[in-house]
Amino acid sequence: MILLGQPRDALRESLRREGYSVCEELVPGAAAIIVRVGDCFAPDEARRVRAALGTRGRVIVACRASRVIEVWTTLRRVGLESKRTLFVHGSGGTAVDAIILARVAKRGGLSVQIVTTNESA
């Protein structure tokens, strides 16, 4: 498992406790890469992620809900297809965060889910 984009220590430690090998550099043949997107998801970064994924690898992108279309488009341009998107709604009723699962695959088959939390954003 590869974590990019300044992941939190708690996530890193949680993954290690679950038995995942965690590193913070792109390594060829990775089975899974987690990317936390801040201001933008640059095509060059997406290409590096794509190049590091194994043939069955997956990328998980965490971003603000307002950036979902940009992330979907960037992933598709580099050959990664979004297969599942989860929108996280705070108690205010609007989506604040999104988690996108993508992999090398044919177009189509996108599943969108909505989760509501009791915490305010």
Image (tube, rainbow, N blue to C red):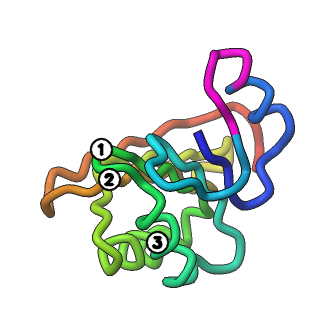
Query: How far apart are the alpha carbons under marks 2 and 3?
Result: 13 Å
- Identify residue for label 3: 71
- Identify residue for label 1: 56
Magenta part of the chain: 16-22
Query: Is most of the magenta stretch helix, strand or loop?
Result: loop
Q: Amino acid at mark 3?
A: Val
Depth check: give the residue in front, 66 or 1.
1
Marks 2/3 in contact by CB < 8 Å: the verdict is: no
Q: Quadrant of residue 73?
A: bottom left
Whether residue 42 is visible here, answered yes or no, is yes
Depth check: give the residue in front, 111 or 80.
80
Q: Amino acid at mark 2?
A: Arg
Query: How far apart are the alpha carbons under marks 3 and 1?
Result: 20 Å
- Dot 1 or dot 2: first in sequence order is 1
- Dot 2 or dot 3: first in sequence order is 3
Whether residue 62 is visible here, answered yes or no, is no
Q: Residues within 10 Å of mark 1 (few under 14, many from 20)?
A: few
Q: Quadrant of residue 53?
A: bottom left
Instruction: Please give the name of the residue rendered at 64% of the width and 16% of the height, measured from the top-left corner.
Output: 18
Marks 1/2 in contact by CB < 8 Å: the verdict is: yes
Q: Residues within 10 Å of mark 2 (few under 14, many from 20)?
A: many
On the image, the x and y values in percent for residue 121 come to 76, 50
- Identify residue for label 2: 103
SS at mark 3 in the image: helix
In the displayed structure, would residue 23 be above or below residue 28? Answer: above
- Dot 3 or dot 1: first in sequence order is 1
Residue 82 got which mark? none
Q: Nearer the viewer, mark 2 or mark 3?
A: 2
SS at mark 1 in the image: strand
